Amino acid sequence: MQKILNFIKKNKQFSFFFLLVILLIFVAVFAPVIAPQDPYVSDLKNALQAPNSEHWFGTDKLGRDIFSRVIYASRISLPATLTLVAIIFVAGTILGTLAGYFGGWVDAVIMRLSDMMISFPGMVLAIAVAGIMGASIKNAVIAIAIVSWSKYARLARSLVMKIRHEDYVYAAIVTGSKTGYILRKYMLPNVIPTLVITAATDIGGMMLELAGLSFLGFGAKAPAAEWGLMLNEGRTYMQNAPWMMIYPGLAIFIVVVIFNLLGDSLRDVLDVREE
């Protein structure tokens, strides 16, 4: 307990933003309890109501409570974003580590695949993949993962290549250590801290990309409560009912800022340059 308190005192900024992330997860988990109304029940008599005491964020074109939909949207956007970051983190780390350690044709194949992904504008390729696979939040995650793993692979490869020819690695090889052991013992520990920092700082950007695909019609489908889709539904009513766009946009802004600042503070905690 004392160690935790000392860590919090030493890293106040990180602890604060980590607490906010925990709060966001709490909101997503307990959305059915927090949301005052069912976000999917239509009530056309109350359509396009301005924010009031009954509907804090107003209602949409179908009379659904926007506050409840914003709360419920966290149950789609947060898990989808964290899943996306986890996929590209694991895939990029494994492929980059293998490419940097083995070199040769393994490195050539993985890096040429990476070059193919980089040669296309990321969002355009993601839209093309999502369009081929069909509109859904699952396919949007897959589409962005396909075009985003190369960043992590290249970073992991460069970090592995820095230590691949160190004396202690050659000593491990000479003494008969297996490849799997060397990768786990020497390569991954040198790669993981930097990639964790990168992943933390990318969460906000990945959320924006998922929301962008949903806004363009390649992500979540109606009647799902998802922030990007809610922005798309509200854009035609921007002049008459601006609250339909203001509150989902504000939710995206707040969550992205929290994760970006968490990533910046995590960089200070795990600053590999100090090691």
Image (cartoon, rainbow, N blue to C red):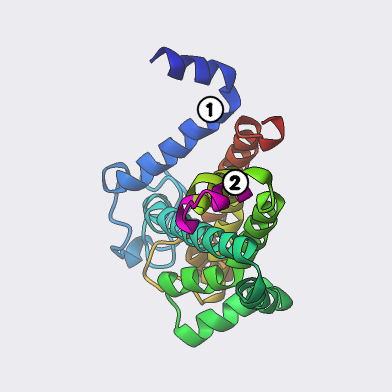
Tell me if 78 is positioned left or right of 100 in this view: left
Residue 16: give its label.
1
Residue 250 shown in magenta? no
Q: Position of residue 166 (x, y in %)?
A: 68, 47
| Quarter-of-image position of residue 97 | bottom right
Tell me if 44 is positioned left or right of 159 in this view: left
CB under 8 Å between discs 1 and 2 = no
Which of label 1 and label 2 is nearer to you? 2
The residue at 70%/78% (across/down) is 120
Tell me if 155 is positioned left or right of 7 in this view: right
Residue stretch in magenta? 170-181
Q: Say which amino acid is labelled 2.
A: Ala
Overall secondary structure of the magenta section = helix
Q: CA distance from mark 1 to mark 2?
A: 44 Å
Q: Report whether residue 247 is seen.
A: no
Sequence-first disc among 1 and 2: 1
Q: Nearer the viewer, residue 158 or 20?
A: 158
Q: Say which amino acid is labelled 1.
A: Phe
Q: Position of residue 41 (x, y in %)?
A: 28, 63
Can you say which quadrant of the picture contains the N terminus? top left
Q: Residues within 10 Å of mark 2 (few under 14, many from 20)?
A: few
The residue at 39%/62% (across/down) is 225
Q: Residues within 10 Å of mark 1 (few under 14, many from 20)?
A: some
Q: Position of residue 229 (x, y in %)?
A: 49, 67
Tell me if 50 is positioned left or right of 46 in this view: right
The residue at 40%/63% (across/down) is 47
Residue bearing mark 2: 171
Can you say which quadrant of the picture contains the C terminus? top right
